[in-house]
Amino acid sequence: MKSVKRAVSPLARRLKEARIRKKVSQKELGILVGIDSFSASSRMNQYEKGKHAPDYSTVQRIAEFMEVPVCYFYTEDDQLAEIILLFFQLDEGGRKGVMKKIKEVI
């Protein structure tokens, strides 16, 4: 019987990307978001491999530490993920400007 390779979830992939960008280890991130130090590394590893998924409140804490919006972790589309990150960096005026431009284009 052939083994079927499971696709990695967007959450797992984005979590790893964000952690690497922030230059923290799995263990450091886990501890910083409230996971017990004895299991922080293994739990974060399982999250990044897609074996388990963190609950929503954990994702919120991770997003806060990573300085990204929660929705970034859930989008499947790479371009949309990039747009989310860029949009999140804008101040309110910049966001309004981007929204206006998008509406003009559409």
Image (spheres, rainbow, N blue to C red):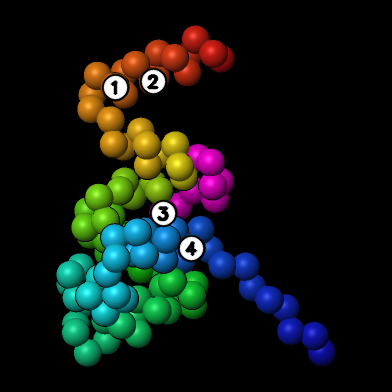
Q: What element carries label 2?
A: helix
- Find disc 1 in the rendering and name its residue: 94
Q: Are marks 2 and 3 in contact (CB under 8 Å)?
A: no
Q: In which quarter of the image is the C terminus?
A: top right
Residue at 46% x, 45% y: name it: 81
Quadrant of residue 88 in the image? top left
Residue at 25% x, 50% y: name it: 67
- Find disc 4 in the rendering and name its residue: 13
Give the mark nearer the N terminus: 4 vs 3.
4
Q: Are marks 2 and 1 in contact (CB under 8 Å)?
A: yes
The answer to whether residue 79 is magenta is yes
| Residue depth check, mark 2 versus mark 3: number of the one nearer the observer | 2
Within 10 angstroms of label 2, few (less than 14), some, or many (20 or more) residues?
Answer: some
Residue 15 in view, yes or no: no
Quadrant of residue 63 in the image? bottom left
- Find disc 2 in the rendering and name its residue: 98
Residue span colored magenta: 73-80
The Cα–Cα distance between marks 4 and 3, rounded to whole angstroms, is 8 Å
In the image shown, does 55 or 44 lie closer to the viewer?
Answer: 44
Give the mark nearer the N terminus: 2 vs 4.
4
Residue at 53% x, 63% y: name it: 9
Q: Are marks 1 and 4 in contact (CB under 8 Å)?
A: no
Disc sitting over residue 73 in the figure: 3
